Amino acid sequence: QKEVEQDPGPLSVPEGAIVSLNCTYSNSAFQYFMWYRQYSRKGPELLMYTYSSGNKEDGRFTAQVDKSSKYISLFIRDSQPSDSATYLCAMSASNGNKLVFGAGTILRVKS
Amino acid sequence: GAVVSQHPSRVICKSGTSVKIECRSLDFQATTMFWYRQFPKQSLMLMATSNEGSKATYEQGVEKDKFLINHASLTLSTLTVTSAHPEDSSFYICSAQGHVNTEAFFGQGTRLTVV
């Protein structure tokens, strides 16, 4: 079993839809949770960063962490074609160190 | 965010040759740099962690003699793939961290193709 499981998709939605991306994990030591966006042939770009359980909102993006269920989510409201990318969840036991990534979900937003 | 530059962005080399990839932090001093490998449609896998002035720490299963990492200054780390083989073809990405417990910023990646 992988430490971090993420559905690779692809996930295809119409413009304006609400997108839900999810990851599950098995290591209860993880405390720091991140979502990255990666465009084709580029390095990952940090979108959201959350410590422990709870919600965090930044513009159209909302990150949720449920440590009791070992489940994290990223919601994208009013999705745009420019949101089309691969979204990677990542987590670590200590802040900023040794990230463990999910496989990434390919998102396609159709105009 | 801070800028991390990785060079080259794409390289093709012959089997048996060595390839060097550079990772530079342009506007901050990186005490720690991480090197990842990513296969198509797969996750980033951490290969090694390097701290300036000391030997890199390699993840289990990563051959340290094949993937040479040098972190000689606070703004530059290099990954050298020695005696490259076609199975080394992959996307290699570095990230740089200024201080412990702070965000690590990623480079744009290097696509290595070994023919």
Image (cartoon, coloured by chain):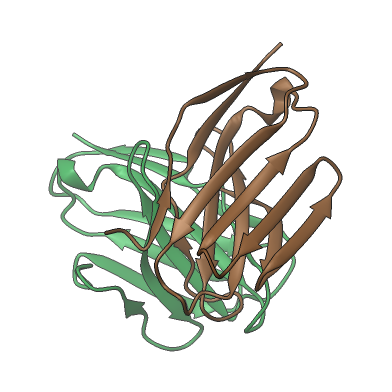
x and y, in percent, of residue B59 in the image: 30, 73
Classify the position of the N terminus of chain A by image quarter. bottom left
Q: Is residue B106 left or right of residue A58?
A: left
x and y, in percent, of residue A101 in the image: 45, 57
Q: Is residue B19 left or right of residue A67?
A: left
With respect to residue B52, does B47 lie above or below? above
Residue at position x 58%, y 62% from top?
Answer: B24
Q: Residue furthest front?
A: A68
Residue at position x 76%, y 49% from top?
Answer: A62
With respect to residue A103, does B60 lie above or below? below
Q: Residue furthest top?
A: A111
Q: Nearer the viewer, residue B89 or B15?
A: B89
Q: Is residue A96 visible?
A: yes
Q: Nearer the viewer, residue B18 or B66?
A: B66
With respect to residue A69, does A18 lie above or below? above
x and y, in percent, of residue A104 in the image: 47, 43
Q: How many marks?
A: 0
Classify the position of the C terminus of chain A by image quarter. top right
Q: Is residue B1 visible?
A: no
- Chain in green? B
With respect to residue B106, does B73 lie above or below? below
x and y, in percent, of residue A67 in the image: 57, 69
Q: Is residue B55 left or right of residue B16?
A: right
* Chain A on-screen colour: brown
Q: Residue furthest bottom?
A: B54
Residue at position x 50%, y 64% from top?
Answer: A70
Q: Nearer the viewer, residue A103 or B36?
A: A103
Residue at position x 60%, y 74% from top?
Answer: A96
